[in-house]
Image (cartoon, helix red, strand yellow):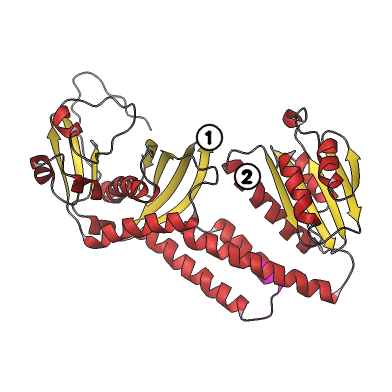
Amino acid sequence: MPVICAVGDEVFCEVDYEHRSKVAPNHTMTHVLNWALREVLGDGLDQRGSLVTADRLRFDFSYEASSGVSVADLEKVETLVQKTVDAGLPVTSKEVALADAQAIYGLRAMAGEAYPDPVRVVTVGSPIEEVLQSPGAEKWRAQSVEFCGGTHIATTSEAKHFVLLEEKGIAKGVRRIFAATGAVAETALEEAQRVEKRMNELESSSVEEDALMALQKDLDSLVLPAVPKSQLRDRLGELRKQLKKKQKKKKKGKVSKEEQAAALTELKEAVAEAKSLGKNFCVKTFQGAGVDGKSLREAAQGGEFDIAVMVLNQPSPKALECLAAVPEALQSEKAAGKWVQAALATVGGKGGGQAAFAQGAAKGVEEEALQVAAEAARNF
């Protein structure tokens, strides 16, 4: 129930230290993450926002690469932050005259933010008093120095663990990272080890569809570190290819519901990735039966896709299928029928349909037809 206070009432302010003990490591590691991103990705990267909770941290930053931050660079960033955690560096703070603070070499501050004078400066590594003795020294770039008025840990070792959980685009030129420390990070690392163990077992045994579907479900639902999660997805993709080859040898006929579900999951992942990169379309290719027209149409009509989607299937070496679904908002610039025709024209195929949905096919095609048609579709 809400508490009603009146003038003259006596109230007490009390700090929730248990809650603070979980927030503080995430806050300090947000500073270290900001520094590490600049170390790996270079200058020109500026903070665009952040959020710190007891469970995780969120950090938004400017980055112009259309493909986002590579898995290799994410791994470098994560390694830099974890090294800082392992080093047990002191975290110090002090209120400093704004002009003196702004003179510190390598200082990180929120672009466009108006800071008070004096301003609180937080350092991770050399104490702030030492930094202020020679503020112009280039060596301060090698550690986190940032304006901040929030709560922090006393030494980086209190964070115990650090993992990047996700990296994605949220607007043109702006990326978002989710990360965690402490028990949450430790649990994510343990889950990743368990999933990797299952992956190793699958890779050393006969590939079965049910096992792949179960593993895919866990990869989608579990909280795992971003780097191993990406690597596990790639390995799962290779197992899917093996399974498809195995199934082609066994039978030629109707594609099972499980295979359609797996292909549709792949398509949805590709659409999500395209959206994260700021694209309004996605072209997905399948070596094999892929996604059929009924599944694509039902998904589009069910509102699962709000960007234009094209599927190119190559069910056999000499055949190509093309399907497209386009939401109403994009039909004026990328009508499905014209899009399908443009893709298939490059490989001698034909197709057509309405602005919302279209399909077509090509027969007697060359081996590289799938990629040729996909390239034409992306350039349409």
Q: Return the x and y of residue 212 as percentages of the image width and height.
A: 66, 68
Residue 309's place in the image compared with 161, above or below, is above
Q: Residues within 10 Å of mark 1 (few under 14, many from 20)?
A: some
Task: Mark yes or no: residue 184 visible.
Answer: no
Relative side of 286 to 68, left or right: right
Closer to the camera, 20 or 48?
Answer: 48
Q: Quadrant of the C terminus?
A: top right
Indicate whether 212 appears above or below 267.
Answer: below
Percent x, y of residue 181: 35, 55
* Amino acid type, mark 1: Lys
**Percent from the top left, x then y, of residue 71?**
49, 56
Q: Which residue is mark 2?
A: 274
Q: Residue at x 33, y 57 (%)?
A: 80
Q: Residue at x 73, y 31 (%)?
A: 330
Q: Which residues are magenta?
A: 205-212
Identity, as a three-letter code, of the amino acid under mark 2: Ala
Which label's residue is closer to the chain start, 2 or 1? 1
- Dot 1 falls on a residue whose secondary structure is loop
| Residue 313, image quadrant | bottom right
Question: Rounded to the nearest whole Å, what is the CA distance between mark 2 and mark 1?
Answer: 12 Å
Q: Which mark is residue 155?
A: none
Left or right of 185, for residue 175: right
Q: Residue tagged by mark 1?
A: 172
Residue 247 sits inside the magenta stretch? no
> Which residue is situated farthest in the bottom direction here?
205
**Left or right: 299 as drawn, with respect to 172:** right
The verdict on residue 208 being magenta is yes
Whether residue 318 is visible to the viewer of this picture, yes or no, is yes
Quarter of the image with the N terminus in it: top left
Taking 90 as reference, is 94 above or below it? Answer: above
Viewer-closest of 159 and 144: 144
Location of residue 74 in the rendering, given as x and y in whole percent from the top left corner: 44, 54
